[in-house]
Image: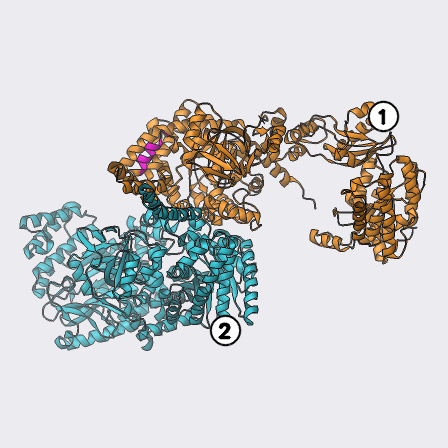
Chain colours: A orange, B cyan
Amino acid sequence: MTERWVYGFDDLAAAEAAAGGGWEGVRALLGGKGAGLADMTRAGVPVPPGFTVTTAACNAYLAAGGALPAGAWEQILAALAGVEAATGKRFGDPADPLLVSCRSGAKFSMPGMMDTVLNIGLNDATAAGMTALTGDERFVYDAYRRLVQMFGAVVLGVADEPFEHAIAARKAAAGVKDDADLAAADWRALTDAFKAIVAGATGRPFPTDPLEQLRLATEAVFRSWNGKRAVDYRNAAGIRHDLGTAVNIQTMVFGNMGAGSGTGVAFTRNPADGTPELYGDYLMNAQGEDVVAGIRNTQPIAALAAEMPAVFEAFRTTVARLERHYRDMQDVEFTIERGRLWMLQTRNGKRTARAAVRIAVDMVGEGLIDRAEAVRRVTPDHVDFFLHPQFVAAARSQAVAAGRRLASGINASPGAAVGVAAFDADTAEAWGKAGRDVVMVRPETKPDDVHGMLASKAILTSRGGATSHAAVVARQFGVPAVCGAEAIEIDLDARLLRAGGAVVREGDTLSVDGTTGEVFAGAIETEVPDLSDRDLSTLLGWADGFRRLGVWANADYPDDAERARSFGAEGIGLCRTEHMFFEADRLPVVREMILADDTAAREAALARLLPIQREDFHGILSAMRGLPVIIRLIDPPLHEFLPDHTELVAEVARLEATGSDPDALADRRRLLAAVDGLREANPMLGLRGVRLGVLFPEIIRMQVRAILEAAVDLARRGVDVRPEIMIPLSSHVNELKRMRVLVDETSAAVFAERGASVGFKFGTMIEIPRAALTAAALAEVCEFFSFGTNDLTQTTYGISRDDAEARFLLHYVEHGVLPANPFQTLDVDGVGQLIRLAVDRGRAARPGLEVGICGEHGGDPDSIAFCHAVGLDYVSCSPFRVPVARLAAAHAALAAAEPVTA
Amino acid sequence: MTERWVYGFDDLAAAEAAAGGGWEGVRALLGGKGAGLADMTRAGVPVPPGFTVTTAACNAYLAAGGALPAGAWEQILAALAGVEAATGKRFGDPADPLLVSCRSGAKFSMPGMMDTVLNIGLNDATAAGMTALTGDERFVYDAYRRLVQMFGAVVLGVADEPFEHAIAARKAAAGVKDDADLAAADWRALTDAFKAIVAGATGRPFPTDPLEQLRLATEAVFRSWNGKRAVDYRNAAGIRHDLGTAVNIQTMVFGNMGAGSGTGVAFTRNPADGTPELYGDYLMNAQGEDVVAGIRNTQPIAALAAEMPAVFEAFRTTVARLERHYRDMQDVEFTIERGRLWMLQTRNGKRTARAAVRIAVDMVGEGLIDRAEAVRRVTPDHVDFFLHPQFVAAARSQAVAAGRRLASGINASPGAAVGVAAFDADTAEAWGKAGRDVVMVRPETKPDDVHGMLASKAILTSRGGATSHAAVVARQFGVPAVCGAEAIEIDLDARLLRAGGAVVREGDTLSVDGTTGEVFAGAIETEVPDLSDRDLSTLLGWADGFRRLGVWANADYPDDAERARSFGAEGIGLCRTEHMFFEADRLPVVREMILADDTAAREAALARLLPIQREDFHGILSAMRGLPVIIRLIDPPLHEFLPDHTELVAEVARLEATGSDPDALADRRRLLAAVDGLREANPMLGLRGVRLGVLFPEIIRMQVRAILEAAVDLARRGVDVRPEIMIPLSSHVNELKRMRVLVDETSAAVFAERGASVGFKFGTMIEIPRAALTAAALAEVCEFFSFGTNDLTQTTYGISRDDAEARFLLHYVEHGVLPANPFQTLDVDGVGQLIRLAVDRGRAARPGLEVGICGEHGGDPDSIAFCHAVGLDYVSCSPFRVPVARLAAAHAALAAAEPVTA
């Protein structure tokens, strides 16, 4: 009995039986494309009829040195007869010819690697018949010359250049520039010319027998499996060489066959907002290119209901069937040929964030997908969209068209905003307080600019990267920011910026899009998506059900904490106490504390800070009642709280040179000496964090006292407080032992004074490689670890975040020296090793050790997947990343639970 | 048969038989002290006779609830009779009484933890007899009252205070301040008072029967095994509680028994220079305290030969025997009692570095010890001594007495020197070139001070620690240095320093001792030990035979390299190329290169640097012919080559304020803008090392070209050159891959141009944690690793060396937060983990990978032991540490080969 080499698209059951085992076997036998066409056909989708010559036939053909196996041709002819019956056309019939395409289709997609021949079946006779049917001679001879050209190239190995030269010569002769301007006569002449090229190159005339065309094309596709391109591709992609390719022979259909014909594209749901309605356009008596080209006005898909009710009904039913079959919103191409609907292509449709969420939620309601699948289908970027205002698309396009785009920088913090330019923090704050929308513009920002940044609607800098101070603060507080917009030249003295030819003065309006990095002159209308969107809430609720990682937030202020909580944060992973020191009413006291000559003076200043800090902690612990709050004790080098060194040097030099004000000079000199005394070559690695605590234990005592006094006061009023005290920058267990003693002594004193106590945890940041390496020892003293991956990346990589991005890190990423910016996506190979090691050793030393991450990576989806994999208890990120992190954590859990398929 | 509980010091054989197995068993039975006394006795040393009551007796006593085991007391009495026979005295004999001591002695030394009673046998009658014999009533009653006091405290549990109060009252009554001023009558009266105190406290009179004294004392010593102090000590030291203590009962001998008696101390060899001769003093008719106190003039030991020839001969023979027995130079105490020599104590004698080396070498010649032992006995500090001038001890003492010591700082670089103070590098260089000895004095130093430092005999700074720039450079070049002498106030404007009340002006003479950290006004005579000392050469040659680690040197200049080679360096582990950039004739070109606006301008400057660098490498490769030379490509941040930022800011502000010189202002502003552009918040973690190479490949090409052109030129002249090209600061393998391409392209070009080639290696520093963590990947690209443990410590610990020492690291070490300064002694727990991991992973990826260390730890003996343990191929250190490292490497190998004993 002859083996079966050919399966019609409508005979999937037989292919399944032949393949023996499951869908994989079918794909191996029919190739991916052939299996898909058969699958759609079985689902009741009107796919143009056709059949597949199997991969086994290909292998037999190649093994035999280029001979179709016994019976194959006969089976092809039989299948072709079936197609003729299904279409009512005949192959080679001059009156109403069947045309077919011949395409490769291997088990694994190898896009562009193998060959295709279209319009098989055309010759002078059938071309004349087609012309009569379509009334479009130009179309027919364009199709015909394409057949000759593709056949020549693919089947006969004729070089492409002579064909292109012929077209060029024809255009020159006709005095036109574009192919589109050639007339029917030109294409007919070119068809003849092409046939002459083929004959000339091969010594044989172009085959006019449709069956000969089909047979030669089929064999050529088989041979293309071993073409150089295909072999190279398989080597690179790791695909076996013995799989072979199938050949799909499919009816060509045409939408330009007169009044009953047409073509269109459509989405099964609205891709802009997800509304469950058909959405698309069609054009009668036209080809697909005509719809896309926009030369003629298309009709909305709904109009088809009136124009061709039966076809519309078939279309409606078919796409509903496709959605059910693929369990996702589909983007389809269809053709109506003389009243008959054919589906040419279907694929999952692209959609906006809003649509993605709605479709996912709706499809769960419709029973098409389960909740896990819905969660999987929404991306972190989709969720992020809901958190920030956006420019109205049309308004932005108008601004671009009007030449108002000034520059593009780094999209440092997402969201769009409009406001007047302010060139320093004090101006920004004053205008902001006066109710004006402000865009703060600086070459770069520093910690003492924060009050102005907080009062602004957007931040724009000309220097610094995605992890510059401006970028980090902006993301932290959800303020849109564009950083490092190098095309902008800021003149602080003249209070203006220049970009290209434009000048924007202080007070002029700017529009800034932190999502795209664009900066515009003038105002652009914005719109605000709604985070409380019912569908998004539903989806994030489902995500919460899948994730194992907790999602906490980094928040320094009560309203920050409340926002985080409203976004779903389950705790505060990092409350930085030093931001509290920078506020205007406190900074003088903080400076007094720093510049104190002795412990007594320092303690006096600290005593004045104590009630202020207690109030701060009272607020945040109260906002987070019932949830843990990790409070980090003082971290930054003290000089950050003092005036800028360079400015002081210049001031002293000026006062010295002029000799005008001896009192001011003496005062500035004293201050400069103090600042000089605290200056460090590398402050990042200097006297900060726990090192401050070892040298000045009185600071730690004050802070711990403030935390625990606030906690006890709240607890006595029945508030469930869960403070956790975190020591930054530890590198040796002895530092922590000292801090533990201070904390225990202070807590005992506070509890005795207040006559009441609260539970609290003691722990450390892990942000120095040595801390990670000695995690077992640290865990003996600590109840929790929190990975400060910003600093841990700096020290593990030996890269200063403040310096690196502008200087070399962006160059590194652009030029492929590094795969990604390690401050955005966690460096799993390096930093990740230390994290894994610290988690394992820490938990071995103290089972139940609480372990989380509070670096900016805590809000990065890729990094969150790693955090899940190494078994952290939670990730902590800026409040505005909390919804994103909830989704990403669910993705990580779902991916880990999924069996991996090759 | 009754068990044997007592062994005479002269009956070691019996104790050995009873103990069954070896010396350990004897020590367990007799305790360490008893075993030692028996051992010395057997060796023929005249030890005052006595016996040991065994630890077994102690255990039996304690087990019985405080009863001596059967037969023990009888055996003690029998042994006592033996002692009476040996000494010719009788216990309790009023005419010539035998006195004994009763001391604890457990298997393991527990210093001060258990009890001792001296002068047992004294009572009113024997005291009178002793007085007649010695003619020294004061001595006798002082001894008697001591017996009463010790017995009261140890045996009867009487508190110490009443005794002290009685002495105080007596001194008040006599109107004297010191015990030494009390007369015989006072001590006699105090003896009576003490007896009354004992009687009053215990309700029983002080026992006058010598045998009762002995029995009670023996039992009290047994009981002290379970005293609180002893139990706590054993818990802390991990000593078992069931060992028990022995009791040693030994004859007391006295050197103040008249004309034929005396006492002395002596070394068996000269402890100052090691000459094999007796060295010491004695005093006739005196006690040991008298010799030490220096109240009477002592005689040199040689005088004893004339005064008591037989005793001297016995002494000579005895100490020779002791040296042979202990195989080391001995420091002995002896007493002559009425013509009879007794050795009271012997121990290994302390000695100078010079003596240590000579004695070790001599003893090998004498067959006393083997070479390994000789190498073990010389310490790294001993070797270091030979490398630096020292103050003549007497001259220093005079200077101290004269109040000329100005301050003490950190002993940053060893050696003593005298010179005139110069307050800046240019002055130091000018004066140095003019032939003056200069001490360069600065608050702190910077890279552009190096020319002045090199021209100086010593360096003195008022700021910075043991790893400050000044300290590191000083050690590198063997210039003595005292750093961070905070008591010194430097006034650069007035060109003077103040310390206490003294003022030293520029040009005044200073004496600086970098070994001790002392600074003196005026000159102090110095002496220079001789590194080529024959004995030292011999010893270091032996050390070379034992070590497995190679010893290489860090050297940047040919004469540096030659010195290292003469000290025994087997290669250059670190040749820093940037020092070459700082020299006056090159710096302008380097600045031109840095400030170049484009690649072409940079290449033009580099082209001018090429021949200069080629010349540098020519010199060093030539000096190290036949040995490897690791050349590190450019490392420091570029701003280090530019003028100081703060100074420029002040200058610009001054010029702005005065408006006097618009041209200068414009020029300075341009320069400031350039410096500003290169400024970094944390230059240590900034744009330096390989990052420069990635951004400016033309610099790498120039340096590689210079190295290989020099190497090829030498090779063509028959010189065996072995260059190794080292990339600094790598953190990702991709950086190294890029550098490898540059190096390979450049080498191919050079070899083609020159028509000849040389072999070379390509490798990287490991000085960033990530490099260590990803060592397997790096080793795929590298032929060698060199651990830059200075930077690796900085990054692993998150500590900036430039800032940390003065700010907090010294505080940390002083207060026990850290066990040691991790920049001096390698942090094995943290940094060591990364080194071990990198070595293991690197070698696994590339067997035969060459691995060494070039941080300053390469010259630190403790760190060298670690380097040996992790299997490095070599350590590289400053030339002046090479001899020390050779010895330390031998020690590490010998220690690793030794069986460990508990």
The chain letter for the residue carrying disc 2 is B
Residue B124 location in percent, x, y? 10, 57
- Binning the other alpha carbons within 10 Å of mark 2 as few (below 14), some (14 to 19) or many (20 upward) gives some
* Residue A743 colored in magenta in the image: no
Left/right of residue B728 with respect to residue B109 in the rendered view: right
Q: Residue at x 26, y 38 (%)?
A: A660
For badge 2, the amino acid type reads Ala
Q: Element at badge 1?
A: helix
Is residue A734 or residue B71 the one in the foreground?
A: A734
For badge 1, the amino acid type reads Ala
* Residue A590 colored in magenta in the image: yes
Q: Does residue A643 appear in the picture of this structure?
A: yes
Q: Residue at x 7, y 57 (%)?
A: B184
Query: Over which residues does the magenta segment extend?
Result: A584-594
Q: Does residue B3 appear in the picture of this structure?
A: no
- Residue linked to disc 1: A310
Give the quadrant of residue B280.
bottom left
Q: Residue at x 70, y 46 (%)?
A: A902
Residue B33 location in percent, x, y? 28, 62
The chain letter for the residue carrying disc 1 is A
The CA distance from mark 1 to mark 2 is 91 Å
Is residue B307 or residue B713 the one in the foreground?
A: B713
- Residue linked to disc 2: B715
